[in-house]
Amino acid sequence: MVDNSEFDDIPGTTVFTATRSHEGFHLNQFCMSLMKAENRERFKSDERGYLDEWPMTEEQKQAVLDRDYNAMIARGGNIYFLAKIFSTDGVSFQTAAASMTGMSVEEYAAMMLHGGRSPEGVRSIREGN
């Protein structure tokens, strides 16, 4: 397997690599299943039962149950697939993204309207600069 450890040095960013894609395959396929109304209804009526039909890790399943999008991404989830979960929940992309940053929806919107996060600050976790 390819060593992608250099990507893990970017503060506040999880790069979706081939390794993460492989790890998150079933999580992302579960998300895609939510494109069908009948699957959304099955999931909403028994989340754990529906998740148990998928060969995901327990950590992935718990992240879905907790709606911990950062944990899902760390375990191979792709934000474009995860959008199916928050859409199923009736949550906007902006609201979900704000929750991932620890900001309120208003703070997140203001940040994005003013050009996003500043490029200034810590650029490397290992080097602290």
Image (spheres, rainbow, N blue to C red):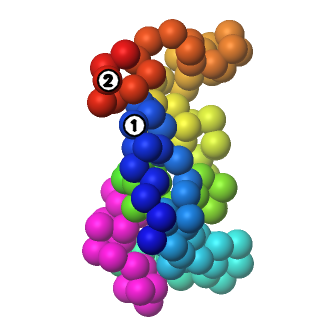
**Quarter of the picture holding the C terminus:** top left
Task: Find disc 2 in the rendering and name its residue.
Answer: 127
Looking at the rendered structure, the secondary structure element under dot 2 is: loop
Residue at horizontal 54 percent and vertical 42 percent from the top = 96
Observer-nearest residue: 54 or 73? 73
Residue at horizontal 56 percent and vertical 12 percent from the top = 118
Query: Going from the N terminus, do you reach mark 2 or mark 1 first?
Result: 1
Residue at horizontal 35 percent and vertical 60 percent from the top = 63
Q: Amino acid at mark 2?
A: Glu
Q: Residue 38: where, in percent of width, then height?
A: 65, 83
How far apart marks 2 and 1 lie (CA) works out to: 9 Å
Q: Residue 10: where, in percent of width, then height?
A: 44, 34
- The magenta stretch spans residue 55: yes
Does 114 sit left or right of 103 as displayed? right
**Quarter of the picture holding the N terminus:** bottom left
User: What span is colored magenta in the figure?
Assistant: 49-67
Does 102 sit left or right of 95 as displayed? left
Looking at the rendered structure, the secondary structure element under dot 1 is: helix
Asked if the residues shown at circle 2 and circle 1 are in contact, with their CB atoms under 8 angstroms apart, the answer is yes
Residue at horizontal 68 percent and vertical 10 percent from the top = 114
Residue 86 shows up from this direction = no
Task: Find disc 1 in the rendering and name its residue.
Answer: 9
Question: In the current view of this chain or complex, which residue is farthest to the front?
Answer: 2
**Quadrant of the rendered image containing residue 108:** top right
